[in-house]
Each structure stands twice: as C-alpha cells, then as structure tokens.
Amino acid sequence: MGTGPRPHVDGFARRIGDRVTLGNPSRALIPLALIALTLWLPAYADVQGPDGSTFSFNGFGTAGVVHSSEDKADFTASDFEPTGAGYSRSWSASVDSLIGGQFSATFTPQLSAVLQLIAQQNYNDTYWPHIEWANIKYLITPDFSVRVGRIVMPTFLDSDSREVGYGNPWVRPPTEVYSANPITSVDGLDASYRLHLGRVTNTLQASYGRNLAFSFANGSKFDARYAWGIFDDAEYGAALVRVGYLSSDITLNDGGALFDAFRQFGPQGAAIADKYQIVDKSTSILTLAASYDPGQWFVMGEWATSRSESFLGVNDGWYVSGGYRVGPFTPYLTYAQITQRNNSSPGLNLIGLPAYLAPTATALNADLNQVLNSRPDQYTWSIGMRWDFMKNFDLKLQLDCINLGAGSAGTLINVQPGFEPGSTIFLISSVVDFVF
Amino acid sequence: MPPTNRNGWILIGLALGLICRVATADIVVVVSAKSPVGALSKAQVEDIFLGKTIRFPDGALAVAIDQPEGSAIRNEFYDKVVGKTAAQIKAYWSKIIFTGRGQPPPSVSNTVEMMKRISANPAAIGYIDRDMMNDTVRAVF
C-alpha cells in the first residue's frame, strides 16, 4: 500500500441514497417514539369521504439484530447506513430495523396520491424519518398511468418493497445485487403501461428524474442527474420475467485528494484524474430477473451488471434463492455473488519525470490501482427460515456465510487496521417483521 | 396414542369426515345476476382477486370483493383458487400497498353483505358458499 492520500471508496454504493432527512440529530429515541405513535394510531385506518374518495393509513416495520463474526469491519444491509454489525457493534439493531407509514388517498377513480415516511438509520447516522415516496398518480386508462413526485426507481425485482420485510422471504435482499444500485428513488415522473396478451400481463415502465444532492458527514457530495430507466415485467400466472436498464450521470467527489495529487503531474495526471474521478460520470445498471412462485414453493434469481466510466468500473452481481412452505414455516436457501471485472491502470508514466518525483508517482500509481481493485468481490451462502407466527407478523432467522475474494473487503465498510481481506465471515440475523 | 376400542375409531372417522367436508365446502365465484359476464377460468378469477387485472375478459370493469379477513371461506378461497395461504396473500398485498400500486379488494363483514354488494353492482365479483346461492347472483366459476 502506498503512502499517498487514499479516497474513501470502501463503501461508495453504501453511502449513496436519495434520502432527505426532515431534521437533524437525536438517535435511537426517534424510532421508539415512532413505534409508540404507530401503536397508538388505529391499527388500520380506512376513511371513506362523502364523495367516494378514500384515505387510508398502513404501516410496516422490522425489528431485528445482526451479529457478525468479523469485528474489524461493519456489515450493513442498506446502501447508505454508516454503521453496522461487527466493528461498530457486536450485535447491531440498526442494520435491519426500521418503521414506515404510508398515507394513501384516492380522490377519484383516476386520481390518487401516496406519501410514505420511513425512519431508519440514515446516511448521516440519524434516525429522523425521511420521505420515501410522495407522488400523485393519474390513470389515463385503467392500464396506463403516470406518476409525478418522488417515485421509486424500480431497478430490481424487489426494489418496490425492499423496505417491507413482511413482503419478502428473507431477512434482507442479497446485498451482492442490491448494493449495486446507487439510486432507489428520484424526484421526477414515470409512466406505466400494462398490456394483456392472453394470460400474459406485460408491464412496461419508464422513469425519469434526479435525486436531491446531499453531502455525507465527511463532506463528500453526491448527486445523480438525468436518471432514467426502462423496466419491463412479463407475468404469466406464477411466473415473472423482468428486464431493466437504468442510467444516470453521477457526481461523487470522493477521492478528491488522490485525484488532486494526480493533477499536479500536468496533462497526463489530469487525464488520469478525469478518467477515474466521479464527476458527471455516466453510470448504468442492466438487470435481468425471474421468479416462479406457485404457492407451495418459490424460486427466484436476479443478475445485475453495473458499469461506470470511473474508478468504480464494471461489477457483476447475481443470486438464486428458493424456499419451500411447510405450514407457517418457510425455510429458504440463497446463493449470491458479486465480482469485479478486471480494473487496473498503468498510471503515470515515470519516463520523463524528474527523478525526485518518481517515488511520489509510483506511490500514487499504487494507490490508484488499490482504489481500482477495492470494489466488492464475494460470494455468500444464506440459509434461513421465515415463521408466520401470528397474523400480520413474521419471525425470521438467517445464517449467512460470506466468503470474501482474495484481497477484498467485499461489501463490508468501516474497515479497520488489522482486518484480513479474503476471509470468511459468519452472520446471524433475527428479525420480526410486521404490517398494520 | 391409537384408540383402543371400536368407538374410538368411529369418532376418528367422523372427525376426519367432518374435516374433509369443511375442507371441500363448495365455494362458488359469483357475479350479479344482471352481469353479462360468462364463465371464468381459475386463472382469470385469480388475476382479478390479485389485482393483476381490473377487467372481465369481455373488457367490462371488474370489482373484486373479499369475505372478512380470517374467515374460513376466505382462507379456503385463496387456498383453493389462488393457491396461497392467508399469510402469503397478506405478504403479497403488502408489496402492492407499500408502493402505491393498489389496495386489496374491499372486504364485507359476512356473506349476506356480500350478496347485497354483488347483486347491486354488475361489476362486482365475489365468492360464497354454494348453499347460499340465490337468484340475485350467478356462478361464474
């Protein structure tokens, strides 16, 4: 490892989010207060207006803990949690726990609106609720709708209900695929067209928008502009096939110090900085997914390739998961993997440089290649069980065995001195999910 | 422990018979007698109740109505016709609700209420025990 400055790249994807918090500090008291508030609210409110309009309130939540066998790095579930299980806490409740509430209003058969708030660990380590969705939907025909406002960017099969644990078979969607997604929602608009061809229902959706720029605690600014995506779902009975493409121009002034150092080396250094620095860099994700759920059992899989014209390079992630239902119990097994395509750079050409600059240039080149190779590389076996133990509640227990690729810290963050890359890590997670 | 006398076996036989009867209670999917909708396939009924379509095959609007949550007839309908347990159906709708893509069918408090709603609305579709059939509704599945 070189001695030069090194950007904080271990968790690029993890620190990207669109969340806008409603306030500042305070910690674990907030979710507790929210839980108290939601328990106080009527379990399910559905109010009919005099003119046929309806207003409803629904909620969902997850309370859980995770323990990691690795104490020199953090495991996190979501893209932007600043702390997790392992280094920050031996048993972490902040990885999976959250609570959400949604107000839905139907004004006319054509016009409806949704406001969803979620309280969970935010990128800046607060627990203030953020606005997950806030949009107005208009049905032009029963099968053709448009939405305006804060809308989901449905990159993945489970993007829509990623936060709703009760709707999912596992404790959390496989991070090997889901952490590849830099944008979960945008402020913009989308259109969805549903076509019925015999028993096949095809839904084509196009989305466009941007997510609000924000700064991380370390000062790094994130912005995703011109985000657009096209997603097509074809459903045939219990079978679903999905293909999606998402593109955005991303700016993340992470690694500024390293690239500033390169720029000191004249045009050739500037060219390297321009090539790898994330300033308005086109970033895309191509996804393919399929699932089959006839009721008694299910099997599903997803594949995602993310491609960025920056030091992030090209990464491939995929998983296959299946489960079998036995009464209220659903045991499941998942295999997930993420790999990085070869990413290296010759760096600065030492020939022609003054001799006294050669050691610095060599160190910078080493740092650059370290950064280029620090993308996640891992595979994970997960085995778990969902137990629907009472109405509107489930309990899940999951064991994960994460095998880090040689020299990689995988999707772990907050890597500490003494951490051994390439090791095998065990996680044990237990959550209770609920809807109300 | 197995029963040691003949009466014990008879009791078990009766109990099994009862369970089987309950399990095969005849459910019919019904629309208003005034509705022009013809017979539906299992798949078409499933699509309407899962919100995958809001129309009958002839293009007319379809409004699904559910029996009360937790009722035996509702659980059996979803088990037999859709192939999902009550918990699975709840999980399915959780995914739909929390993305603003829709709401589950409204539910009525009992079969009498169901009959009223269906007979009053040619777009309505529901399910009842066959024994409750009368001439205000018509079976389509």
Image (cartoon, coloured by chain):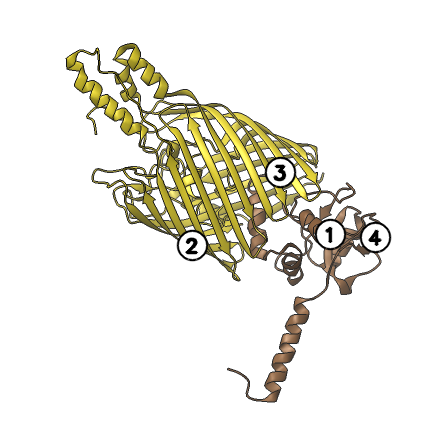
Chain colours: A yellow, B brown
Sequence-first tag of 3 and 2 = 3
Q: Which residue is mark 4?
A: B33
Q: CA distance from mark 1 to mark 3?
A: 33 Å
Q: Is residue A407 visible?
A: yes
**Front label number (2 vs 4):** 2
Q: Secondary structure at mark 3?
A: strand
Q: Are marks 1 and 2 in contact (CB under 8 Å)?
A: no
Q: CA distance from mark 3 to mark 2?
A: 37 Å
Residue A140 versus residue B4 in the image, above or below: above
Say which mark, if any, is on residue B41: 1
Q: Is residue A430 found left or right of B34 in the rendered image? A: left
Picture coordinates of residue A25, whole percent (x, y): 36, 34
Three-letter amino acid code at the position of disc 4: Ala
Q: Which residue is mark 3?
A: A105
| Chain holding disc 1 | B
| Chain holding disc 2 | A
Q: Secondary structure at mark 2?
A: strand
Sequence-first tag of 4 and 1 = 4
Three-letter amino acid code at the position of disc 1: Ser
Residue placed furthest toward the front: A351
Q: Which residue is mark 2?
A: A384
Q: Are marks 3 and 2 in contact (CB under 8 Å)?
A: no
- Who is closer to the viewer here, A67 or A21? A67
Mark 2: give few (<14), some (14-19) or many (20+) Cα within 10 Å: many
Picture coordinates of residue B80, whole percent (x, y): 65, 59
Q: CA distance from mark 3 to mark 4?
A: 32 Å
Mark 3: give few (<14), some (14-19) or many (20+) Cα within 10 Å: many
Q: Are marks 2 and 4 in contact (CB under 8 Å)?
A: no
In this rendering, the count of numbered labels is: 4
